[in-house]
Amino acid sequence: MLSLNKELAILKINDGPSLLILVPTPDETYAHFTINGTQAFSIAFTSQDIPGFHQHLTDHKVKVDDIQHDDDHAYFHFHDPNGNKFQVHW
């Protein structure tokens, strides 16, 4: 569920207890942090269909990194229009 108004955007993930709330600000702030000058995500999403979600974001012109594999774990990073870095994993 996505709720938008002029003050904020709220994304409720399925029926779970989590909400992602985005609030506009004139300040230069991000939903990620940096380690030694490299962006590190602070918010991650779980998807059982990593290739499908990756393709969906690509089709919608979202900046996405390549899918990575680490043992039985697959993940990729993407950036929203404001440059915030997120991860999708399974």
Image: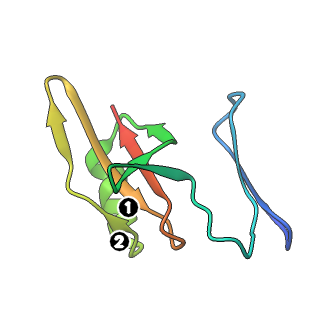
What x and y, as percent, mark residue 16? Answer: 68, 28
Q: Indicate left or right for 60 with 4 as reference.
A: left
Q: Please report contact status of discs 1 and 2: CB closer than 8 Å, yes or no.
A: yes
Q: Which mark is residue 28?
A: none
Q: Indicate left or right for 61 with 5 as reference.
A: left
Q: How far apart are marks 1 and 2 (CA)?
A: 5 Å
Q: Residue at (57%, 59%) from the top-left corner?
A: 30
Q: Residue at (39%, 63%) from the top-left corner?
A: 57
In the image, 32 versus 35, the foreground residue is 35
Q: Residue 59 carries which label?
A: 2
Which of the 4 image quarters holds residue 13?
A: top right
Amino acid of disc 1: His
What x and y, as percent, mark residue 47? Answer: 40, 37
Which residue is the site of mark 1?
A: 56
Above or below 55: residue 88: above
What x and y, as percent, mark residue 27? Answer: 70, 71
Above or below 4: residue 61: below
Q: Residue at (38%, 76%) from the top-left corner?
A: 61
